[in-house]
Image (cartoon, grey):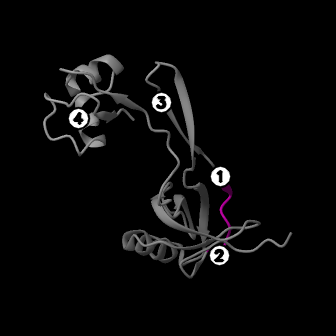
Amino acid sequence: MKNVSMRFCGYTFHHNPATLRIGNTGNIRELISPTCEPQSAHLGRKPVRITGEGELYGADCIAQFEVLQKLFYQGRKGLLSLPGMPAVYAYLKELEMIAQPKENVLGYRFTFIEAIATPQSAEQPEFYETIVANESLWDIGYRYGVPVDTLIRLNPQIKYIDALDDGERVRLC
């Protein structure tokens, strides 16, 4: 494997970081169904988190850090090339100097977050309750342990939360 230099938004790290951690996390939503049984739904993956530490060397080590700082302040996504991995689009989320600069050496730490497109419609199970006469969203919320403000958000078609129609369907999650 060819060891290439780490790059971000056109900036090439003169020395690759001493440590590099790449974290992958699944997006799991735990739900309680109307029958009160726990269920889980896999909603894809969360953005990859890339963290590391390293040192910048040379008489211009502070200037090198200032270039990274400028990229951080811009807050834009850019192409991140990592040694031995495919390039990804990412945001520079955190950047910090971790040691007082010594002569020609400056320690730093960073965190990148992968920029992934949000799916248009993630598959999420939906649960509904059919209303019987004289029920309100307060009753439904109490019965299933769902806050009323959540029920209001999930059911924008309901105009009066205290006067639901018999047979009306209320989305629970």
- Which element carries disc 4, helix, strand or loop? helix
Q: Nearer the viewer, mark 2 or mark 3?
A: 3
**Are discs 4 and 1 less than 8 Å apart at CB?**
no
Depth-wise, is mark 2 or mark 4 nearer the camera? Answer: 4
Number of numbered tags placed on the structure image? 4
Look at the magenta stretch and give its main secondary structure.
loop
Task: Residue 71: give its label.
Answer: none
Judging by the rendered image, the residue that carries numbered circle 3 is 31
Mark found first going from the N terminus, 4 or 3: 3
Residue 14 painted magenta: yes
* Magenta range: 13-21
In the picture as drawn, the residue positioned furthest to the bottom comes out as: 10
Nearer-N-terminus badge (2/1): 2
| 127 magenta-colored | no
Establish if 125 lies above or below 121. above
Q: Residue at x 47, y 19 (%)?
A: 35
* Residue position for label 4: 149
The three-letter amino acid code for the residue at tag 2 is: His
User: Could you say whether the residue bearing mark 2 is in a helix, strand or loop?
Assistant: loop
x and y, in percent, of residue 18 in the image: 68, 58
**Which residue is disc 1 drawn over?**
21
The location of residue 82, given as percent across then percent down, is 68, 67
Which of 128 and 110 lies nearest the eye of the viewer?
Answer: 128
Disc 2 and disc 3: Cα gap in Å?
A: 48 Å
Q: Is residue 156 above or below residue 82?
A: above
Seen in the image, is 158 located left or right of residue 62?
left
State which tag comes first along the sequence, 1 or 3.
1
User: At x 86% / y 69%, what residue is drawn?
Assistant: 1
* Lower position in the chain sequence, tag 2 or tag 3: 2
Q: CA distance from mark 4 to mark 3?
A: 17 Å
- Can you tell which mark lies on residue 14? 2
69 left or right of 18 in image: left
